[in-house]
Image: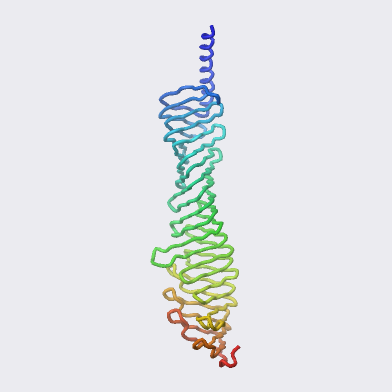
Amino acid sequence: MIRLLSKYAFILLIVCFYTSYGICQDVIKLISSESMNLQRTPQGMITIVKGPVHYYLPDEDLNIYCDETEVHESKNLYILKGNVLIEDPDKTLQSNLIEYSELTKIAYSPGAFVLRDSAGELSADKGEFDYEKNILRANGNVEYLSESKTLDADSIIYHQEEEMAFAFGSIRLSEFEQNAVGYGEFAEVYLDRDNGRLHGDPRIAIADTADTDSLYIFGEYLEYFGGDSSKFIVTNNGRFIKGEIEAVCDSALYEDRNEMIYLRKNPRILYRMNRVVGEEIDLYLKEREIDRVLVSKNAVAYSPSDTTGIIKKDNELKGNTITLYFIDKIVNKVVASQNAESLYYIVQDGVLSGKHLVTGEQIIFNFVDGEFNSIVAENGVSGRYRTSGKIK
């Protein structure tokens, strides 16, 4: 009698299971498999489905393929094993092990996985994709690749519908069109608009296909725009380095298309032992090499009168504008215009022997091999010369 009751109880359990599983099929349909068996565990009933296994979610138009599945009925949890592929019209998710929750619509991969969509391909050591919100969260050796860029990071949050990614830790962002590589600790990347921002000691290196010096950009906050309007915006403690030239400011704009760098808010140029300051500084590039520098509004250029450092006085060149002209990466001429004034010290054998003060509408400093050679003053010129005994 006990055996008979046990037999009927087991049959009833099987009937109840397949009835409940049939209800589940309204959401997740089992299309094909090789075998199926039911196991009772302390955690509840588990169905083992072996394959190749194919599920289909009609509401999501989602196909799931794998070698084997554990279905935890009490948790509505599917543990997908071996050659797992989750595919819908917008993307594919691949891994060797994925836990998919029917309740939360989250697919979790505890190991390496690859997500592919129209934007590109993203891989990481582990992560989860929320199929209800279309958000991916990934950690460990994150790598993203598309036709226009690559992005490496420690972790990432990717909003698939907006094609926007928030990346964290050890950022390396490469933009192919600009030959630019950016680094930082946090990045916001808009994949569809070819636009992004870098924070956390950010820096960008822009290489040239020719044999020239790379352009290095630093700042507290960097933003770039790709495409036809390719440009970089730098905010706070901005710094540009190109060969021997360093440009510093608090706000800057670099336009790759026009080959222009606009320095604003306390800008200054450092070149060898010289420095130039003004309210606005514009750098004109030619084939990504600096061609000339225009300093506007209260422009002043300082250069050491004695390169040995014995005489602690600087030569000064002032004007409403100062323009530095370059040939083969070296300054060959500096022109001060509009109310120009030059203060130049004569040093011989480490001794200060004279001082020139010249004013005019235009004053030109000529250089040979980057070293000062001569002064030319034009239009309304006046000046004074003092010998060493009267120099202050």
Q: Is residue 186 above or below residue 134?
A: below
Q: Residue at x 47, y 61 (%)?
A: 205
Q: Residue at x 55, y 78 (%)?
A: 321
**Residue sitting nearer the eye, 373 or 364:** 373
Marks counted in the figure total: 0
Quadrant in which the C terminus is drawn: bottom right
**Residue sitting nearer the eye, 370 or 365:** 370
Instruction: Check the image and tell me how it is coloured.
Output: rainbow
Does any portion of residue 377 appear in the rendered image? no
Q: Is residue 29 above or below residue 8?
A: below
Q: Position of residue 347 (x, y in %)?
A: 51, 87
Q: Quadrant of residue 250?
A: bottom right
Q: Position of residue 353 (x, y in %)?
A: 54, 90
Q: Residue furthest top?
A: 1
Q: Position of residue 104 (x, y in %)?
A: 56, 35
Q: Quadrant of residue 265?
A: bottom right
Q: Residue at x 56, y 40 (%)?
A: 133
Does any portion of residue 105 appear in the rendered image? yes
Q: Position of residue 359 (x, y in %)?
A: 57, 87
Q: Is residue 144 above or below residue 98?
A: below
